[in-house]
Amino acid sequence: MPAQPSTAVSITATDGVVLGGRVYEPVSAPRFEVLMLPGVGVPQRAFRHLASWLAEHGVRSTSVDYRGIGESRSDPRALETASMTNWASRDSVGALRFAESSAQGRPIVLIGHSFGGQMLGFSDEFRRLCAAILVCSQFGQTRHWDGAGRLKVAAFWHLILPLAASVFEPVPGWTGIGEAIPRGVAREWARWGRTHDWLLPYVAGAAERYAAFDRPLRAYAATDDPIAPPRAVSELLGRFRSTPVERVDLAPADLGLGSIGHLGLLRPGASERIWREMLDFAERHAGAANTAEPGSPAWSSAFSASER
């Protein structure tokens, strides 16, 4: 069943900044919705293969570029208001509300890549999800790397990123970040990287939100990921206290690949086996939400908008 081409849409962040998003529409009526939130320096187009595959399997997906990158650079307020915190608490929540407005009561599953999975600590609104799938999501303190990798990450947080942010707007991708990112994002990201507890001292209530998040959670880590090594993934996953985490660690040999890295699970080919696992997980929990009795936790996670 061929997927329809993606449709460009405008998504409004909670402070009114207009963002560029994409909707991948299945041919048949969707059974549930997926919200895709990318990592830092990762444009939403990185999701295009997975989103098209999901559309072929009857799932509508919404992706978004955070303010100041990709398709979200046209609003004149984008660069001047861009920060990690605004990406998470304003842009991502706006994308969730957009997905809910078109879902017509269908359950919504999050697929968060890297920083996109950290969003769960920024707003209680994410508890309206029926489930979440995290792909290479982590806390990025230097201690989670060894040897030369640790030195490289330390230099990135303490020297390369702060220096680049003092010179460039936006900070160019050749500094090692992928897509160019706004100066405000780079500065806040570097500050988190130099802090023992990552974002927790700077985001009020984040630790409590992670601990209280009670929706089904599945998380993937790649053993050769230079940006989210398994120890860094464990640091984030250990913050979830109210839901069991289905964790999957993958080595390149598990998929018959030479490498997976940070973005490999979003690429077509061997990774489609993992996409099938993601779909099965999402269908299982979306189905439970669809058949839940009114007033049950599954019902409220899929249908309640009262926390807005």
Image (cartoon, helix red, strand yellow):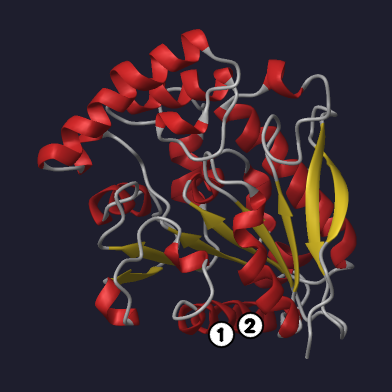
The residue shown at (76%, 31%) is 73
User: Is 30 on the left-hand or right-hand side of 163?
Assistant: right
Res 289 seen here = no
**The C terminus sits in image quarter:** top right
Residue 220 to residue 17: above or below: below
- Which type of secondary structure does the marked residue at label 1 adopt? helix
Q: Amino acid at mark 1?
A: Asp
The residue shown at (26%, 33%) is 153
Mark 1, Cα crowd under 10 Å, few <14 / some 14-19 / many 20+, is few
Q: Amino acid at mark 2?
A: Glu
Q: Position of residue 141 (x, y in %)?
A: 28, 34
Q: Residue furthest left?
A: 147
Residue 272's disc is none
User: Is 134 on the left-hand or right-hand side of 36?
Assistant: left
Residue 283's disc is 2
**Count of numbered tags:** 2
Q: Residue furthest front?
A: 174
Q: Position of residue 179 (x, y in %)?
A: 56, 38
The residue shown at (68%, 77%) is 54
Mark 2, Cα crowd under 10 Å, few <14 / some 14-19 / many 20+, is some
Q: Give residue 299's quadrant in the image.
A: bottom right
The residue nearer to you, when weighing 122 against 13, is 13
- Between the C-alphas of marks 1 and 2, the distance is 5 Å
Q: Residue furthest bottom?
A: 1
Res 179 seen here = yes
- Which type of secondary structure does the marked residue at label 2 adopt? helix
Residue 166 to residue 197: above or below: above
User: Is 216 on the left-hand or right-hand side of 68?
Assistant: left
**Tag 1 near tag 2, CB within 8 Å:** yes
Which residue was labeled with disc 1? 280
Q: Position of residue 281 (x, y in %)?
A: 54, 79
